[in-house]
Image (spheres, rainbow, N blue to C red):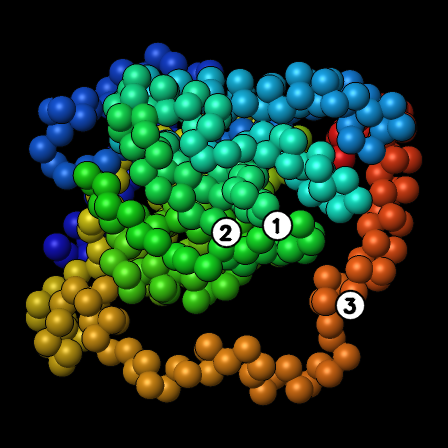
Amino acid sequence: MKRRDFISTTTSMAAMTAMPFSALSHIQDVPEKKDKKDGKTVVSILQSDFMSGSPESNPYHPKFDKSLFQKEVVQKNIDNIANLLEEAGRRGSDIALTTEDVKGLYPLIMDIERPELLREFAETIPGPLTDRFGAIAKKYNMYIITDFIEKKGNDMHNSAVLIDRKGSVQGVYRKVQLPVPESYVLKAGNELPVFETDFAKIGIAVCYDMAFPEITRILALQGADMIFMPTGGYGWTEDLGESTLKVRAADNFIWFAIAKSSTLFGAGRSAIANPLGQVVADAGYEQNCVLTSYIDPLSTWIQPENSYGAVLSGVANMRARLSLERVPSSYKILTDPNPEILKNYPEAKLLHDQGKEALLKTIQRLKKQYAKEAQDTEQRVGFRRDIL
């Protein structure tokens, strides 16, 4: 495929991509999966907002009520995601991707003095949440990737689940790169699986994994054609977030989709990038919308056979060429836990490695701040004072 032809295949549903889902319910021109003969895949990304409740549903309010947290925060979040998944299903999606932490438990992660509270609201796999989303997957014959806090034995993980078209759990990815404060209470995963679907081989990364190029490179080297990433963050800055997405895709000549939560005056920017690092769909700043695109995850950059690079290398497929030209014998430092650069920062030590006392001191200081904010009901434009 010529480069120009490749680019033209990625934008066939651009008119649909950045509109709020409520405005898209009338669209009926997505091809039926049974009739597709062009190898294209309908990919939907959920850009959801986190739901809030009364002040007493805030875990840091002095009169915190667990039942209100369950009813006004957790259940509302689940219902909201379920509604968006239904919309993705009505569009004939082959796969739908949700954001990270769909139940909205992140405030509980910060409270290491009450780990039992986080565990109480965490999910098992399979469990009630995968059962509910699985029913939607089965109803619309689509895959779903969703992310939540999982409890497994004595451990808890930030876990992304792949649900197949029949509604069953096909696989689980447990987040490897845990940021502060997740590292306080969650256990990091140690595997980077690639999953077989009927439209492509896919990998899953979660949020902070994006900051480490090794994650996406490993998934690509294992044959992933496309990576799906639920996330609550979008890079250190908004423009850097977009740049990182584009570079991760282009570095490996693969497709990359991210689903990020959005808030009032806060970027969502859920998006899909093609193997040339071009953003072909972007949800912008819409809240509670479904971004739907019609793409070919198996396509990559194929240079013209008479191009300079293809002639001299003998390989027109850039993904294949990149893999062939690697020199892994020179990359040993990548697996060194104490690389030379750390000698420049002898005093640097992560908080969770400084001992329980230092960690508790910091958390207790933050909790006082959160408790004060939880009781501040002053209404200000652009500020949400009822939740963390």
Sequence-first tag of 3 and 1? 1
- The disc at residue 138 is none
Q: Amino acid at mark 2?
A: Lys
Task: In the rendered view, tell whether residue 237 sits above or below residue 117.
Answer: below
Question: Which residue is found at the position 88% from the left and 42% from the top?
Answer: 369
Sequence-first tag of 3 and 2? 2
Q: Label 3, label 2: how many angstroms apart (C-alpha)?
A: 23 Å
Sequence-first tag of 2 and 1? 2
Q: Which residue is mark 3?
A: 354
Task: In the rendered view, tell whether residue 343 sits above or below residue 265.
Answer: below
- The disc at residue 186 is 1
Q: Secondary structure at mark 2?
A: loop
Task: In the rendered view, tell whether residue 58 sits above or below residue 242.
Answer: above
Front position among marks 3 and 2: 3
Most foreground residue, 242 or 124? 124
Front position among marks 2 and 1: 1
Question: Which residue is found at the position 44% from the left and 51% from the top?
Answer: 205
Verify CB contact (< 8 Å) between mark 3 and mark 2.
no
- The disc at residue 175 is 2
Verify CB contact (< 8 Å) between mark 3 and mark 1.
no
